[in-house]
Image (cartoon, coloured by chain):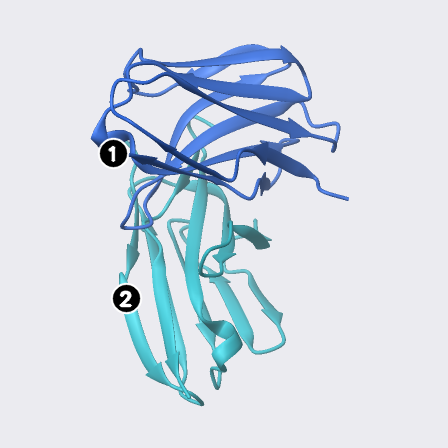
Chain colours: A blue, B cyan
Amino acid sequence: DTAVSQTPKYLVTQMGNDKSIKCEQNLGHDTMYWYKQDSKKFLKIMFSYNNKELIINETVPNRFSPKSPDKAHLNLHINSLELGDSAVYFCASSQGRWVYFGPGTRLTVL
Amino acid sequence: GQQVMQIPQYQHVQEGEDFTTYCNSSTTLSNIQWYKQRPGGHPVFLIQLVKSGEVKKQKRLTFQFGEAKKNSSLHITATQTTDVGTYFCAGTSSNTGKLIFGQGTTLQVKP
């Protein structure tokens, strides 16, 4: 059974488009995250939600908007995509201890 | 702000050689975690160290947490091709409770 799942796995789109990535965790964790991993493998936290409430919002353009409809889901919507948004986006969850990562969504902006 | 520095960024070794990656924090950590990301995969939790000077082993992997709880290391003895991947340390700040990832060390093992 997949603990943290996200869709789609790959996303190829044109500059200027709007896209969403969905994430679900079945671990019963209270906290969910979005991380961005660039081509140099650097993992940067973007957002953190605890029980549907935003608790961390790092320096991320406001084109990125997370939405948590319930504790098990954290979706990421991106408006007006730019070339620099190309990266792998990982959803993750935790219960105050270590972090469980989803399989990642590789976003390519052309 | 708080930083967690990890070195080296890349390491190529011959199969059978040892490998070490080092992690240093600018502030005291309440714990240090290590993750492994296989090529094309996602980071997977390996271990957590909490106590000052703690040493833990997982088969050929040895993890250490420094006495001052500001640094850590991961040592792999006699590397195998299955060890290939990127190893991340992640420290939880004692002050803020935030988990900060290091930049990762990518290990290549030549058979």
Dot 1 falls on a residue whose secondary structure is loop
**Image point (63%, 76%), residue name:** B59
User: How far across and down, in percent of the image, does residue B23 sit?
Assistant: 35, 56
Q: Which residue is mark 2?
A: B10
A72 to A95, vertically: above or below: above
Give the Cα distance between marks 2 and 1.
29 Å
Where does residue A19 sit, x and y in percent of width and height?
42, 20
Return the residue nearer the eye: A57 or B53: A57
- Closest to the observer, B10 or B69: B10
Give the amino acid at mark 2.
Tyr
Q: Are marks 2 and 1 in contact (CB under 8 Å)?
A: no
Left or right of A84 on screen, residue B110: right
Q: Amino acid at mark 1?
A: Leu
Look at the image and tell me in which quarter the C terminus of chain A lies.
top left
Crowding at mark 1 (Cα within 10 Å: few <14, some 14-19, many 20+): few
- Image quadrant in which you'd find residue B29: top left
Above or below — where is B86 with respect to B69? below
Q: Secondary structure at mark 2?
A: strand
Mark 2 and mark 1, same subunit? no
Q: Name the mark on residue A78.
A: none
Residue B75 versus residue A2 in the image, above or below: below
User: Label 1: chain?
Assistant: A
Q: Is residue B15 left or right of residue A61?
A: right
- Depth check: B13 or B49 in front? B13
Mark number displayed over residue A110: 1
* Residue occupying the point 47% across, 28% down: A34
Residue B85 locus on image (x, y percent): 44, 64
Q: Position of residue A74 (x, y in %)?
A: 57, 20
Residue A29 position by quadrant: top right
Residue A85, relative to residue B11: is it above or below? above
Q: Residue at x 77, y 44 (%)?
A: A1
Q: Is residue B75 left or right of residue A80?
A: right
